[in-house]
Image (cartoon, rainbow, N blue to C red):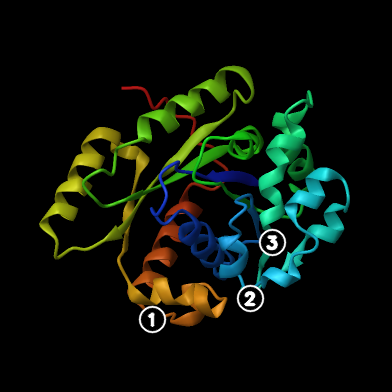
Amino acid sequence: MKFCEIIAVSNQKGGVGKTTTAVNLATALAALGRRVLVVDADPQGNASTGLGVERDGRAHDLYRLISGAITLKDALMPTSAEGVDLIAASADLSAIELELASKKTRNHRIKTLLDKLKSDYQYIFIDCPPSLGLLTVNALVAADSVLIPLQCEYYALEGLSQLMESIELVRGGLNRRLGIKGVVLTMYDGRNNLAQMVVADVRAHLGALVYKTLIPRNVRVSEAPSYGVPVLLYDANSSGAEAYIALAREFTKQEGKHDAKNTKK
């Protein structure tokens, strides 16, 4: 394969569409012919659920992979979306930070694993926890770039500066190649004047970092995880599915170009 890009999907603020974006963008890219892996690095395991892997089917999860109890071959599993593989998460993953706290290589565990898979995939998405703990640091160290979902609400930019500072810290000491892939505006309601104002405000602050595609509020997107499928498989004609396909097309225009823009203003 010509390239492989590892992308950490991260925002310390919960409820912004982080996991929804990781799952549905991965599926949309697979629909466009790309080979994609999703790594569920959130102990809540919602990306695993959204890709059709039941909780009792996660015996070979990221926790056991990092711990050395299983191999990469054991951990990789197919999903409900053709062309998308998964390394699942279970609640056991919440113990990994304590177990790795005294290890010298604690920040590089996920990178060491994923570097071995670069020849097999074109995109590897790491769905991060909504925090800036050790799992998120591991994801940022492993990643080429960070994709930041941002909800179209009044406090959209709240907490973003802290995430940007964390990215700069990782760049400075652990991963100099780490760039910003872009910012995805989610849960957009065009009928809401406030949402339109938020979009304008975010674009004014972040400029070209913000993707043109807006991910709308869409009931189909919300319903799909309960059926264990991405929205493209649940209702391909919904506005949510169409938006993620449009976002995937924006991604393909960037292929092979890791965005290392300086986010400081």
Give the mark, 2 or 3, whose residue is nearer the N terminus. Answer: 2
Residue where numbered disc 1 is placed: 237
Name the residue carrying label 3.
Answer: 86
**Cβ atoms at labels 1 and 3 below 8 Å apart:** no
For mark 3, give the secondary structure: strand
Front of the two marks 1 and 2? 2
Work out which residue is located at the far left of the displayed protein and give it. Answer: 193
> Looking at the picture, which amino acid does disc 3 mark?
Leu
What's under tag 2, amino acid-wise?
Ser
Q: Residue at x 49, y 23 (%)?
A: 168
Closer to the eye: label 1 or 3: 3
Q: Nearer the viewer, residue 246 or 157?
A: 157
Residue 63 percent across, percent down from the top left: 75, 50
Residue found 61% across the figure and 18% down from its top: 173
Q: Is residue 186 left or right of residue 176?
A: left
Q: Is residue 2 visible?
A: no
Which kind of residue does numbered mark 1 sit on?
Asn
Q: Are marks 2 and 3 in contact (CB under 8 Å)?
A: no
* For marks 1 and 2 on the same chain, the one whose residue lies earlier in the sequence: 2
Label 1 sits on a secondary structure element that is: loop
Q: Which mark is residue 80?
A: 2
SS class of the residue under badge 2? loop
Give the alpha-carbon distance from disc 1 to disc 2, as whole Å.
Answer: 18 Å
Residue 217's mark? none
Q: Residues within 10 Å of mark 1 (few under 14, many from 20)?
A: few
Point 81% across, 50% down: residue:
65
Decide: is 239 above or below 159.
below
Quadrant hosting residue 201: top left
Choose the circle earlier in sequence order: 1 or 3: 3
Camera-nearest residue between 126 and 92: 92
Q: CA distance from mark 1 to mark 3?
A: 25 Å
Q: Give percent across and percent down for residue 186.
A: 34, 56
